[in-house]
Image (tube, rainbow, N blue to C red):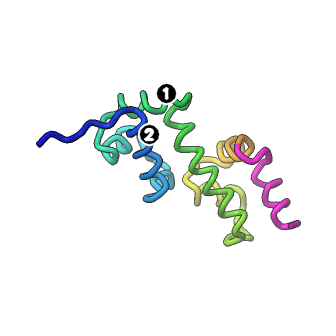
Amino acid sequence: MRRKRLDEGGIYEKMVQLMADRQLYLRRDLTRDELAREVLTNRTYITRALKGRGLNFSQFVNSFRAAHAIALMAEGRYPDASPEEIALLSGFSSEDTMNRYIKKSAGLTACAFRERMTEA
């Protein structure tokens, strides 16, 4: 019995599902090859699926990391954590990268976002 091959849309959906369910984005050293193994495909198909949505691998992974960092700050579970600690807890390798992606997502830096959350 042959396995049904996923198209680019199916591969992308599987990637999103794995990222959400298994929080693969928390691995700071996550590679395209590792994600491809998890999706049961190869890196070329991962690249094509992302490129079809105007993304590269880093943008895809870091968008999940940014959402995670935003959730950590919104929930207030780590009120004394520095932005650098939030970045590391979210899978980012640096605070600067986290700030860039949070600014894209929320329109604010991590510090400004946290301040807004404490005011509410």
Question: Which image quarter holds the C terminus?
Answer: bottom right
Secondary structure beneath disc 2?
helix
Which residue was labeled with disc 2? 12
Q: Would residue 92 appear left or right of 51 to someone viewing this image? A: right
Give 62 or 89, whichever is nearer the viewer: 62
Give 8 or 76, whichever is nearer the viewer: 8
Tell me what residue is drawn at x 84 percent, y 60 percent. 115
Compared with residue 48, is residue 36 higher up or lower down, i.e. above or below?
A: below
Residue type beneath disc 1: Gly
Task: Tell me how far mark 1 sits from mark 2, CA to CA.
Answer: 9 Å
Residue type beneath disc 2: Tyr
Give 117 or 28, whichever is nearer the viewer: 117
Compared with residue 87, is residue 11 higher up or lower down, i.e. above or below?
A: above
Residue 58 drawn at (x, y percent)? 53, 37
- On residue 8, the disc is none
Tell me what residue is drawn at x 79 percent, y 60 percent. 114
Residue 49 drawn at (x, y percent)? 44, 32
Mark 1, Cα crowd under 10 Å, few <14 / some 14-19 / many 20+, is: few
Residue 33 drawn at (x, y percent)? 35, 39
Tell me what residue is drawn at x 47 percent, y 47 percent. 16
Magenta stretch, residue numbers: 105-120
Mark 2, Cα crowd under 10 Å, few <14 / some 14-19 / many 20+, is: many
Q: Mark 2 and mark 1 in contact (Cβ < 8 Å)? A: yes
Tell me what residue is drawn at x 78 percent, y 44 percent. 107
Report the magenta stretch's main SS. helix
Which residue was labeled with disc 1? 52
First reached walking from the N terminus: tag 1 or tag 2 = 2
Compared with residue 34, is residue 69 higher up or lower down, i.e. above or below?
A: below
Instruction: Judge whether residue 19 is colored magenta.
Output: no
